[in-house]
Image (cartoon, rainbow, N blue to C red):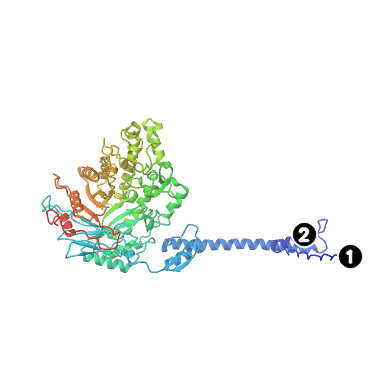
Amino acid sequence: MESQPQPQPQPQPQPRRPRGFAATAAAAAASVSPTGAPSGSAGASTASSGKGKREREKEKERTKLRERHRRAITSRMLAGLRQYGNFPLPARADMNDVLAALAREAGWTVEPDGTTYRHSPPPQHQQHLGAFSVRSGESPLSATSLKNCSVKATLDCQQPVVRIDGSLSPASLDSVVIAERDTRSEKYPSTSPINSVECLEADQTGVINNFCQLADPDDVRQELSHMNSLNVDGVIVDCWWGIVECWNPQKYVWSGYRELFNYIREFKMKIQVVMAFHEYGRTDSADVLISLPNWILEIGKENQDIFFTDREGRRTTEFLSWGIDKERVLNGRTGVEVYFDFMRSFRTEFDDLFAEGLISAVEIGLGPSGELRYPSFSERMGWRYPGIGEFQCYDKYLQQHLRKAAKLRGHSFWARGPDNAGHYNSRPHETGFFCERGDYDSYYGRFFLHWYAQALMDHADTVLSLANLAFEETKIIVKIPAVYWWYKTSSHAAELTAGYNNPTNQDGYSPVFEVLKKHSVTVKFVCYGLQICSYENDEAFADPEGLSWQVLNSAWDRGLKVAGENTLSCYDREGCLRIIETAKPRNDPDRRHFSFFVYQQPSPLVQGVICLPDLDYFIKCMHGDITGDLVP
């Protein structure tokens, strides 16, 4: 019988030798007898172990101190980079964030996953201050640039045609501003002038970058020289709150604007500035984003009610809610105090330019897009033309104001927003509030709409009081929107959600202009509908001409100066004639006309040359130098 092989013994795994604190504990255990007393010479070992433990504790404390010291140094370095270098570093930045910021500053591309590579130089069109202008006789003419749009244009002196270089993106040429001059020697109406110009509106996307630095000084100088050769009279510059006071409250960085203004001063051009307190660029098609200041957004993470809120609780960061105008929720300051401190800083920083008369006017941004309105039709929220928009009064601060107003009225149950007002893209007839004979005209509806519009007017009144204090003896401009869709319906739903209580049975613009009259401002009407585009059809019940007639006459009747600005590009002769008729009504018995007009250049969406026929004639007609209709 064959014997079976004996199994070989398996090697036993060697126990791991304890290290660090585990080794110390094991040694201490080995030195103790079963009775718990130190055995033999274990007393000395215990003493040495206790001494080693104390040394380790001291070393840990020293390590903590070194770490605190290192963090303090890092914190001061980051604060300096933010304040003086304008580096966009997050609140809890680490060295990776610093390295990424330095690499980007040096011209490298740093992806979110850390991939870093050198990219080609930025295309030239992103640095242009493109503009055009013509001036005849004493009537200066200048240009403004379309926000976030850069177009370089040249004016052919032999033919009244604007040739736009198709290789350049839409961002710096946007308008001709024709402003007022002495009219005593002019005949009305055919030669009534709208004569001077303030400006090219220099968008920081091509001029001032998000670090408040002049993007390309040589290119800026070249563009200003080009505009000067075309008799451009001045420049409009948006001064963005989100750039100047970006990182820390009351830490204002004006360096890029100072450099830009110095260049403009060399060419003896006038400057019109915009106090831009709104966000810019949060749309699907936007290439550039200028948010509200980062420290404001940090506060908003903890207290989202500082932003406008719709009925579903969605917030928009386009502009701070007017509910906090007098609430100390911005690091101890109210909303209007924040605006005033910014305006006062600008006035102090550029006192020399005001003294020289170089800065001729200041436009005060009072809402989204710089317009006096609620953010009721925000594309970020999914709004598309011709939706009626939504009421924006559901943050806790505006709700507190609404409850107070309802209590004073004696109907506390009215302290609510309408629950049948539809959604952003609803049509009036689809809602119970805006439909024919809807709740907008009920007792509750009239109360709510009056309160909603009054909040808008109170905001304008408060901010303009401080603006006049900061910019005394300087022309103040306020931009009024043209919400012309659904104007032919009884409720005027889109105007109601924007804050203008203007249904067919009352005038919603008169009380607004009474407030503006108190502050002697110039009203700049954003004439979206100077020409009706193909997508504006009868389904929207739009009436841009009817709205323009109401707004302009309401302002003129109160003795306000009125200026115009178009936002839809006009390419044909009919559009030019419509603009002229709006700016200088032929049959007005009081001979009223615009103080100045901002004509925004068409933006080339395709490659090639875009021509505006008879541009030279159009400008001379605005100036009052020639009469008659546009010739073929």
Few, some or many C-alpha atoms within 10 Å of disc 2 (few <14, some 14-19, many ≥20)? few
Is residue 296 left or right of 216 when viewed as pictured? right
Q: Where is residue 86 in the image (x, y as percent from the top left)?
A: 41, 62
Name the residue nearer the viewer: 580 or 136: 580
Q: Give me the residue at 43% from left, 52% from top.
A: 297
Quarter of the figure with the N terminus: bottom right
Dividing the picture into quadrants, the one containing residue 606 is bottom left
Name the residue nearer the viewer: 299 or 210: 210
Kind of residue indicated by mark 2 = Ala
C-alpha gap between disc 2 and disc 1: 55 Å
Q: Give me the residue at 45% from left, 68% from top.
A: 117
Residue 357 visible in the displayed image = no
Q: In this view, does 509 lie above or below 341?
A: above
Dividing the picture into quadrants, the one containing residue 82 is bottom left
**Which mark sits nearer the N-terminus, 2 or 1?**
1
Dividing the picture into quadrants, the one containing residue 454 is top left
Which is more foreground, mark 2 or mark 1? 1
Q: Residue 177 carries which label?
A: none
Q: Residue 29 carries which label?
A: 2
Name the residue nearer the viewer: 208 or 4: 4
Secondary element under disc 2, as helix, strand or loop, is: helix
Q: Where is residue 291 in the image (x, y as percent from the top left)?
A: 39, 54
Kind of residue indicated by mark 1 = Met
| Discs 2, 1 touching: Cβ within 8 Å | no
Q: In this view, does 328 lie above or below 62?
A: above
Q: In this view, does 135 lie above or below 387?
A: below
Name the residue nearer the viewer: 531 or 295: 531
Is residue 631 left or right of 374 when viewed as pictured? left
Secondary element under disc 1, as helix, strand or loop, is: loop
Q: Give me the residue at 71% from left, 61% from top.
A: 22
Quarter of the figure with the C terminus: bottom left
Q: Which mark is residue 1?
A: 1
